[in-house]
Amino acid sequence: MATNTVSEKPQHKQRKLIDYFTFNTDHKVIGIQYLVTSFLFYFIGGAFAEVVRTELATPDPDIVSPELYNQLFTLHGTIMIFLWIVPAGAAFANYLIPLMIGAEDMAFPRLNAVAFWMAPPGGVLLLGSFLVGAPQSGWTSYPPLSLMTGKWGEEFWILSLLLLGTSSILGAINFATTILKMRIKDMDLYSMPLFCWAMLATSALILLSTPVLAGALILLSFDLIAGTSFFNPTGGGDPVVYQHLFWFYSHPAVYIMILPFFGVISEVIPVHSRKPIFGYRAIAYSSLAITFLGLIVWAHHMFTSGTPGWLRMFFMATTMLIAVPTGIKIFSWCATMWGGKIELNTPMLFAMGFVSSFLIGGFTRGMISFLPFDIYVHDTYFIVGHFHYVLFGGSALALFSGFYHWYPKMTGKNYHEGLGQLHFILTFIGLNITFMPMHQLGLMGMNRRVALYDVEFQPLNLLSTAGAYVMAVSTIPFIINVIWSLAKGTQAERNPWRALTLEWQTASPPIIENFEEEPILWSGPYDYGVDDEEQEEESVADMLADVSAK
Amino acid sequence: MNIPGNIITLIAGILLTLISLWYGQNHGLMPVEASQGAAEVDELFNLMMTIATGLFLIVEGVLVYCLIKFRRKKGDKTDGPGVEGNVPLEIVWTAIPTVIVFILALYSFEVYNNMGGLDPETSRDFPQGEMQMAENKGKMVAFNPHQGHLSLGIGNAKADLEVDVNGIQYAWIFTYPDSGVVSGELHVPVNKQVKLNMKAGDVIHAFWVPQLRLKQDVLPGRDSNLAFNANRIGNYPIVCAELCGAYHGGMKTTLYVESEEDYQKWIQENTFANAQEKADTMALMTQSMTGEKRLEMHSHHLGVTPETLAQLHNN
């Protein structure tokens, strides 16, 4: 009978490849599904960006037609936001939250699978819009332009975003419930890894703002196919109302795209610097402050739109305040590294690259919160440079940092360090050459979303295009590394980084239902060098020997 | 020679301040200033550049220092010092940005107010003081007599010259109500308060003159304003800054800031000569045409050569 009871327990063997193509409820499978799907779309969205940059190498619209050009940047933006960065955040959250808090799975495994399986149809629908004439009114889709540039392409875009938005809401319910209700009993909120705090803040934002986007899109859809006039001025509608509803979601979306990656950085830096995170509570609370402030700043996207002066003043005041919690995070990460023992491996390189380039995005963000300056640079290349520093220099570098940091855990294989560092160097050089000149172009007077521009802007545009090609090349070592390491990489240890968070206490890759037995919380998530060092080392070794013996 | 650490810190601090101050004034990133308002925006930008340069050098300096100084020796398996925080330090780096943003906010308020952005005519959607009461179906209701006339943007009630602006795909049309002149270019006299009354015929456009540092969306179904006082004679681009369709990049024309005499001469020349132009415009507003045809008609306003157009069609 004893053997029977044992065989009823989940089998501790590796997943089969086919599992990743099915409606599987294991959070680790779903995490990988999200990650792989999001990277497929990263390459598609990246290819669109390369075409756009190639077009912009010359002042004339000579590579693609103006309509196709608008379709390409519309889909580039939509894909990178809704099908790369947001699902990649969900990938980390799915994979890591249960492991970090010692749970067997998410709170609602089936809902989790449903949430994932809404994403691929959303992506297919978006790409399928090319068959009926893709949307060409930008990722913001402002009416009345969006009502006039091809009905079905626009409708596909709306339906796709409704699917992806619903997927995001279902994911957020799961993340928040899991974090709040499924921690092992010794773990209080202040002994959770900071990634969990970041996901708690992200989930709150998603739940509060995404339904508003859905509402706006449904009304836009009525205007488009049923001939209503919610936003259509020819029937008495008001296009500015759409902008308010759209940005009520889409500004928080910026934080939905960056907060999970702030969490990733707060995990990576202490481990590879061998120091506790500096100011745990300040970092945790600053995430919550960003959530709160993030909900009341949306109209700074409308400083030159149909907004009266007093409203512009209000939104300037709220917007500028976000500089404070963001600053706290940057200073805390720097202080964590200060005096540490930094191992300059790929995750740490990406993390330091993140701090240095996100900083630039942070400065430009501070500048454009001040109304008179924003009126000048709004809808110029300065803004394009700014948000690429936030989303590529920020989110994407942190995403790669986390990717390499947890690659051994997720795959059970070690990645190739040399290729990883080459990937970092090419990415970092490429991103700075691509996005830095954009700031100057905007200040010189180049507007965004144009295929045709003045000859005086050409030299800097050529530089930017060259940088975009470097970024294209940077994906080659990345792809080779991922595939080669999966096939030929050495077997990863349980805890290659000697990290203290719970996900490193189980096998690499973790077994089904995660832990052999309920893990024991024997230190805080970042207690490096806190106790007597000798003793600490001993206890780590003892614990690991103990766990593997079982 | 052994130099004490605090002297090095002091020298670094002085250098940092000098570099920031110098770069804040000499970045050379902005185009010429054609108005007093533009100069004020640039001063705000210079201050922000100075602060940003200083903070940038500090943070990047810390990163590079960590990169060199705090590297792990090969085979070293020990941890760093177990410092978990420092409350006074954290208070300092919370307080400093807070103070900086408040100073910049007050400064921005001043600049924006000087532009006329808080002018009561345009800064409120519905001025409560001007509500009137009327009887409707036996009930007293409040209504706003200015509803529908109120406009958004940056305005100033006292204008020497008012020009009506109409944004359409892909051209700007300027009408001078005093003389009846209709033009595809904007001519204004130097050192005069000009007020633009703007609306759009089809989709949202945005009126932007980089040299004035001013931008305002031009909306269909709603009026918006822009007020400026150009103080520098010259030709400046007028750019559409809001995505308005496939040929958005071609929606450009020129602002001519002229001496009073040149301006009057231009008005004289155009008062009678633009009858044909007007007919074109009327035709444009009523006929349904393809985008390309429409663009071709206005190609002489757009700064697009016929060759470019031909190229567009071929693609």
Image (cartoon, helix red, strand yellow):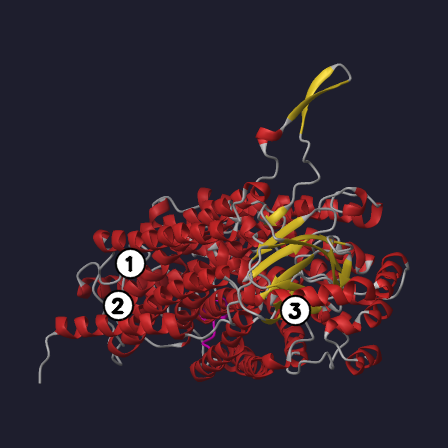
Tell me whether circle 1 and circle 3 mark residues in contact (CB < 8 Å): no
Q: Which of marks 1 and 2 is nearer the N terminus?
A: 1
**Relative to the observer, which residue lies in front, A75 or B11?**
B11
Residue that numbered label 2 is attached to: A338
Extent of the magenta region: A408-415
Q: Mark 2 lies on which chain?
A: A
Q: Which chain carries label 3?
A: B
> Could you classify mark 3 by the number of other residues whose Cα lies within 10 Å: few (under 14), some (14-19), or many (20 or more)?
some
Residue that numbered label 1 is attached to: A278
Side of A508 where B227 appears, left or right: right
- Element type at mark 3: helix
Residue A74, horizontal then vertical, whole percent: 68, 65
- Element type at mark 1: loop
Q: Determine the CA span between mark 1 and mark 2.
A: 10 Å
Tell me if residue B169 can be seen: no
- The amino acid beneath tag 1 is Phe
Residue that numbered label 3 is attached to: B262
Side of A112 where A145 appears, left or right: right
Side of A190 where B180 appears, left or right: right
